[in-house]
Amino acid sequence: MRTSQKRQVSILLPNKQHLDCNVRVRARGQEVLNRVLKQLGVSELQVLGLAVLKDNEYLFVDLEQKLSKYFGKTWKRGSLMVPFILFLRVHYYVESGLLIMSSKVQQLYYAELRQKVLLSKSRHQEAVFFQLAASALQAEVGDLEEREEEEDEEENRKHRLYFLPEDYFPSWLIKRRGRDFLLQHCPGLHAELRGVTRGQAILQFIKEAGYLQDGAVTFYRMRQEKKELRSLILLGVASKGVHIYQEVEGKLCLLYDLTWTHVDRLTFQGSRFEISAVGSLCLPQLVFYTASACHSKHILTHLRDSHRLHINTRAAVCCIKQLEDMQASHLYKEAYICDTTRLAQRLQTNSLSSSMSDCSVAIQTTTAWSKEEECEEEQVREFELCVDEPEEIFVDEVLWTAELSVDEPLIFPSFYWTAVAMEMKQVSWSFWLQISSKTQHQ
């Protein structure tokens, strides 16, 4: 009997929902991605990617590769009755949630961070968890009702029992402090956020999650020695660089914290993975071992693309930080930085040539900005030529070369991030015009 030419794929989302689709046996990752985009109603996933779970680690799917590469022989003899599981995960972490212009993608990004916070092992950052819980409660519950001063003890107790600590705090923190302590003190922090919109609370949560040691980081397990049985080294890929930890009795001990400017070269040969820091740090060459040559290539590609994203969003992040500083100094009551919709409306009223598609704003850039972008691209080449040199890999004892060229299409088109950065610059300019106007009237 001929095997069915269709395979059922189930994509698990960060918010615990799932999408189902049927694809061809010879389908590639892009075919599944197109189905996901259609069902979610978005034009692009931006910072999310499809992943498979292998050896308790998420490996992101190369959209140009056939799915059979990831599911092996079971894919060929599968049927429509048994679904194959893919995960929609955060592929690239960003320094600000405002860089994610799609509200749906931003909510999925938030949902995954919510789960990571509950599993976090950052025991020395207890205060951050209380702030994260308050932001999450404001996003999911809304404003906490004001209590009357004459409420009796029973009413006061009921007022505090509107959430489960297990939904907002990691288990070790609940055990350390006790449920009653969390129920007593968390509402006070939640009440301080009264008036903050759901969108603002989500952005605040995304920002605060980045403060956690193991928050906005993708970890890959490695070994210090090739013949070691346990992988106790964790290489973390973050928006600003590479973090290397060693697991000691269930705790993460930071060994090296390297920003992108600290990294001189990333190379691998087979399962041997090498990180060379710039000479000014006086660090020895860091050598670790991955599970396989393909695993090494996957990690290197992830590092390369994360660095490119950092370069492409650097100007936008700078503008966002300037706006946050303005907001913090109370120079102006309207916080455009916390509301993407109002930000887009503000840009439209300034007669900018813009087109809205899935909450994204594409802005025609000026000549001056194009020159600045060219300068940025030169900086990318300088680093990438070092990182993306041909790497020797051994697969089945056959030597072959992996070309990771800077001329490959960027996963994040530079024009997209240029538009975001331009957007932030226009808001900054509008802000100062209004401040100047108010000063003159006074």
Image (cartoon, rainbow, N blue to C red):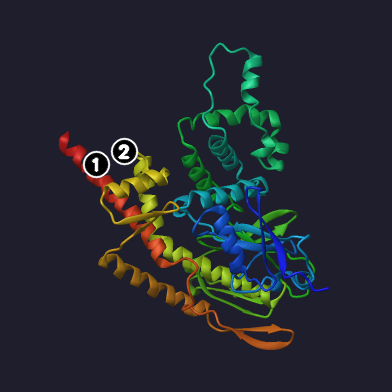
Marks 2,1: beta carbons within 8 A: yes
* Residue name at image x 62 percent, y 18 percent: 156
Amino acid type assigned to the residue bearing label 1 in the image: Ile
Image coordinates of residue 151 in percent, x first then y, are: 58, 13
Q: SS class of the residue under badge 1?
A: helix
Left or right placement of residue 92 versus residue 6 in this view: left
Q: SS class of the residue under badge 2?
A: loop
Graded by Cα atoms within 10 Å as few (under 14), some (14 to 19) or many (20 or more), the crowding at tag 2 reads some
Q: Is residue 430 above or below residue 380?
A: above
Which image quadrant for residue 334? top left
Which image quadrant for residue 362? bottom left
Image coordinates of residue 279 in percent, x first then y, are: 50, 75
* Residue name at image x 54 percent, y 79 percent: 404
Image coordinates of residue 297 in percent, x first then y, are: 62, 75
- Among numbered discs 2 and 1, the one appearing first in the sequence: 2
* Residue name at image x 54 percent, y 27 percent: 144
Outermost residue toward the right?
A: 1
- Identify the disc placed on residue 332: 2
Question: Mark 1 — residue?
Answer: 435
Q: Is residue 141 above or below residue 277?
A: above
* Residue name at image x 83 percent, y 73 percent: 1
Q: Is residue 83 above or below residue 190?
A: below
Q: Report whether residue 398 is seen.
A: yes
**Who is closer to the viewer here, 88 or 18?**
18
**Who is closer to the viewer here, 11 or 25?**
25
